[in-house]
Image (cartoon, grey):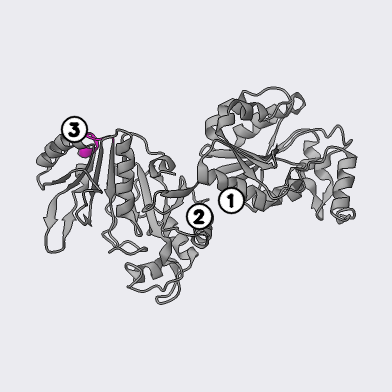
């Protein structure tokens, strides 16, 4: 996945990179990706960077006079599309001195995007900002804090961390101790850490960088899992920006909508309240869903709402579908209207699937994070069934459904955009519609739920 796609960069943006662990590489990588789309892009810094190589930028403008900077940048953009701007060469240090932040607004009028390295880290993979850092331009629309996963398992000392004493003060980890994933997570959401200097209303998308193997990916997912619920963050990227596949996963806000409004006509009484795993089926399913990386759990009730509602945990949000008799499409609409406004996708779960597992749901979510496909469905040897994930780009299609028709119409209409995730067994698809189904379920579970 490319950086500009995962970050959802829009024309006119000012993107600032802060933190440590690959900011410069990420800046130039993003610049090239946007230039390849025909954009005019300016990369720059408000601190200091090393002079870019010919592979990193197509033209370099070094000028201290603001008026001259704008003139030269405008000329360079005409023929190059991707340029780097600095104010001065520091020959002794072999670095470029950055521009004043007030110049960013003028540069933004010349280009489709301005990308700023707004922090220094001495080439290390973790840091905490000093009193004068970071230097984030107020025009910044997208802030990308960066950390490098190669620092996990190493000690909090000067050789591995920039300003370890400040990291220790913010995270509580004593100097010299081994750095764990919680340290990275704490810094990424700390108001005096990665969020320091963030302009009001800026979009924030942390980049967990230097993920090169399965073990590091698992650790990066732990970091993402710890910070995903922070209201300051729009999304969390996991990747390795120096590789051909810079973004492995893009964690976005996903709401789970549990559909529990049906009348259980074939069963004869509310199957949501059947004994399962020492509790009711609805509670069992809800706890399974909660143990995943979803942002929130919304339960849609209808028939027997008062009775079922008594078993809904307080951490769920419950909504009532007064038109439940018109079919499942009405529950889909009610659920979509109830989710948070910043949600990027929804996962529809049926309340009568007792074999659904947190691991199976997490595989669906990770497939979405890793592909950004608008529809993700679990599959087993060609068989498909809920839980099914839909991206926000298809919410209007789902709201247009009518009658007792679920998302199948939308899946068929957008078949080329469906990602099927193979499950290890078909058990996850089992739903309870009749007393016979429930008896079979109890037999398969050796009657463990009979006395619940």
Q: Nearest the camera: 47 or 379?
A: 379
On residue 85, the disc is none
Question: Residue 305: image x %, image y %?
Answer: 77, 37
Relative to 77, is 192 above or below? Answer: below
Please name the residue that numbered disc 2 is placed on: 224
User: 196 left or right of 392?
Assistant: left
Q: Quadrant of residue 403?
A: top right
Query: Where on the picture, by quarter, is residue 416?
Result: top right
For marks 3 and 1 on the same chain, the one whose residue lies earlier in the sequence: 3
- CA distance separating discs 3 and 1: 45 Å
> Which labelled disc corresponds to residue 78?
3
Asked if residue 215 is positioned above or below residue 377 in the image, the reply reads below
Give the distance between the C-alpha atoms of the residues marked 2 and 3, in whole angstroms. 40 Å
> Given contact means CB atoms under 8 Å apart, are the residues at marks 3 and 1 in contact?
no
User: Residue at label 1?
Assistant: 293
The residues tagged by marks 2 and 1 sit, at their Cα atoms, a distance apart of 9 Å
Mark 1 or mark 2, which is nearer the start of the sequence? 2
């Amino acid at each position: 996945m490319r950086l500009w796609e995962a970050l959802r960069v829009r024309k006119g943006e000012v993107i600032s990179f802060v933190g440590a662990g690959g900011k410069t590489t990420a800046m130039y990588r993003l610049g090239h990706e946007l230039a390849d789309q025909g954009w005019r892009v300016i990369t720059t810094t408000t601190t200091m960077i090393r002079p870019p190589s010919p592979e990193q930028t197509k033209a370099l403008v070094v000028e201290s006079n603001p008026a001259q900077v704008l003139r030269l940048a405008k000329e360079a953009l005409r023929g190059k599309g991707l340029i780097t701007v600095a104010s001065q060469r520091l020959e002794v240090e072999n670095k470029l001195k950055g521009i004043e932040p007030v110049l960013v607004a003028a540069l933004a009028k010349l280009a489709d995007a301005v990308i700023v390295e707004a922090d220094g880290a001495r080439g290390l993979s973790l840091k905490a900002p000093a009193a004068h850092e970071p230097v984030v331009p107020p025009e910044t629309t997208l802030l990308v804090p960066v950390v490098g996963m190669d620092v996990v398992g190493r000690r909090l000392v000067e050789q591995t961390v920039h300003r370890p004493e400040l990291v220790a003060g913010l995270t509580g980890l004593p100097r010299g101790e081994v750095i764990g994933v919680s340290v990275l997570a704490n810094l990424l959401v700390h108001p005096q850490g990665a969020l320091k200097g963030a302009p009001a209303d800026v979009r924030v998308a942390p980049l967990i960088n230097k993920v090169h193997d399965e073990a590091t990916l698992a650790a990066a997912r732990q970091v993402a899992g710890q910070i995903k619920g922070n209201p300051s963050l729009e999304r969390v990227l996991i990747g390795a920006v120096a590789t051909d596949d810079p973004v492995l996963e893009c964690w976005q806000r996903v709401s789970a909508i549990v559909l529990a409004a049906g009348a259980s006509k074939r069963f004869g009484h509310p199957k949501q309240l059947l004994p399962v795993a020492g509790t009711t089926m609805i509670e069992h399913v809800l706890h399974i869903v909660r143990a995943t990386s979803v942002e929130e759990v919304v339960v849609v009730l209808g028939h027997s709402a008062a009775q079922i509602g008594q078993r809904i945990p307080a951490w769920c949000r419950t909504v009532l579908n007064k038109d439940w008799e018109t079919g499942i499409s009405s529950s889909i609409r009610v659920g979509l209207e109830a989710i948070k406004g910043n949600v990027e996708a929804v996962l529809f779960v049926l309340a009568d699937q007792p074999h659904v597992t947190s691991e199976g749901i997490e595989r669906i979510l990770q497939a979405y994070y890793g592909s950004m496909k608008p529809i993700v469905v679990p599959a087993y040897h060609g068989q498909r069934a809920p839980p099914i994930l839909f991206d926000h780009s298809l919410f209007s299609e789902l709201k247009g459904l009518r009658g007792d028709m679920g998302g199948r119409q939308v899946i068929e209409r957008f078949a080329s955009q469906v990602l099927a995730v193979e499950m290890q067994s078909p058990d996850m698809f089992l739903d309870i519609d009749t007393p016979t189904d429930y008896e079979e379920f109890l037999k398969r579970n050796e009657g463990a739920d009979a006395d619940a």
